[in-house]
Image (cartoon, rainbow, N blue to C red):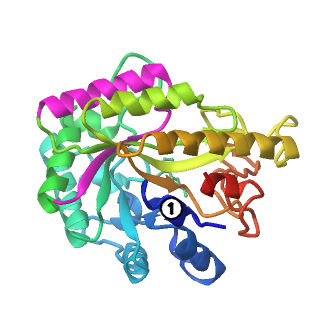
Amino acid sequence: PKTLKEAYKDYFPVGVAVAPRNLSGPEADLIVRQFSSITPENAMKMGPIHPEPDRYAWEAPDAIVAFAQKNGMKVRGHTLCWHNQTPQWFFTDAAGKQVTREVLLERLKQHITDVVGRYKGRIYAWDVVNEAVPDTGKAIYRQSKFYEIIGEDYIEKAFEYAHAADPAALLFYNDYNTESSTKREKIFQLLKKLKAKNVPVHGVGLQGHWSVYEPKESELQESISRFASLGLAVQITELDVSIHAKEHGRREMTADDKSVLTPELLSKQAAQYEMLFKTFRKNRGVLTGITFWNVSDKSTWLDNFPVRGRKDYPLLFDENLQPKAYFNRIVDF
Ligand code: XIL
């Protein structure tokens, strides 16, 4: 049986999101055998990597990049500017008062310059701005601190700083729920504006936090084609296929929530993954990377999210790190 990276070597790198704890023991073996690219799940986000104004925490991200280099894997960086997992200090001065546009821009510039600069030549693609577009409503821009304090040009500035720090890196705008037609159009408008202003944006990341029920093939194809029509590369950056219907917002577990991977759900998941990879293959040349969000069902960010206490089984490898029964249908085509 083939591995993911062998099966797709003429299509795109197949990546996986990791934490430093995944990089030893049986998980490390699985990662090296199956994948050709790696993304730090949390280690390069603003909070984890830049916990205090004058202190960076390089240990974890350095270890991940070194592991990739040692094993001949590519690295996708994630993420330089996001409203989540960003420390409060970014937005406030020593007295606790909100900083001005000029100060926040300077901090953003320093942060991006330092982080991208450190890994220059070793990270081939960066998620520069993450989730800047809201799911609902007409507004294109999410009301984040970056937006409120700087204004809409924080996005183009972030891309410019990243490009200056590593002109060879491919720069992505990354978001979820990109198959819903309203959000897709808003992201499209944002990217179109950036392209018209010659902002150095090279691709769009569709996170791909999907489920056994969504998206439909036509919705996915429409998203890929629409973004590609702007001359952008498309990557699936955070792929998983939840066994639960998608819901937005955190809540507690109820009696209706089941954390069981039934044979019926497993076969739905097989069909969904087959459809997804068939569609990915059809878009060869446009789709330039696929990254799974976590290694195996042993531990995934969807355990407890968005429903506390509920487990999920969204990946191709099971809780014992074994390929699921339908795995060969994904790698033999
Ligand atoms: C998630 C991580 O997987 C979790 O460990 C963390 O607690 C929260 O963030 N969209 C993104 C990712 O862009 O950075 C998120 O990762 C998942 C949703």
Q: Residue at x 15, y 40 (%)?
A: 199
Q: Is residue 306 above or below residue 151?
A: below
- The answer to whether residue 138 is left or right of residue 249 is left
- The answer to whether residue 73 is left or right of residue 102 is right
Front residue of 328 and 164 = 328
Q: Residue at x 32, y 27 (%)?
A: 188
Q: Indicate yes or no whether the magenta region holds residue 249.
A: no
Quarter of the image holding residue 118? bottom left
Note whether residue 301 is visible. Answer: no
Which residue has dot 1 on it?
17
Residue 159: image location, x then y, percent: 20, 47
Q: Residue at x 39, y 72 (%)?
A: 61
**Which residues are the magenta region?**
168-197
Q: Residue at x 41, y 75 (%)?
A: 68
Q: Give the secondary structure at mark 1.
A: strand
Residue 178: image location, x then y, percent: 46, 32
Front residue of 188 and 218 = 218
Label 1 residue near ligand 1, CB within 8 Å:
yes
Q: Is residue 219 above or below residue 46?
A: above
Q: Amino acid at mark 1?
A: Ala
Note whether residue 168 is visible. Answer: yes
Q: Quadrant of the N terminus?
A: bottom right
Residue 146: image location, x then y, percent: 28, 40
Residue furthest top in the image? 138
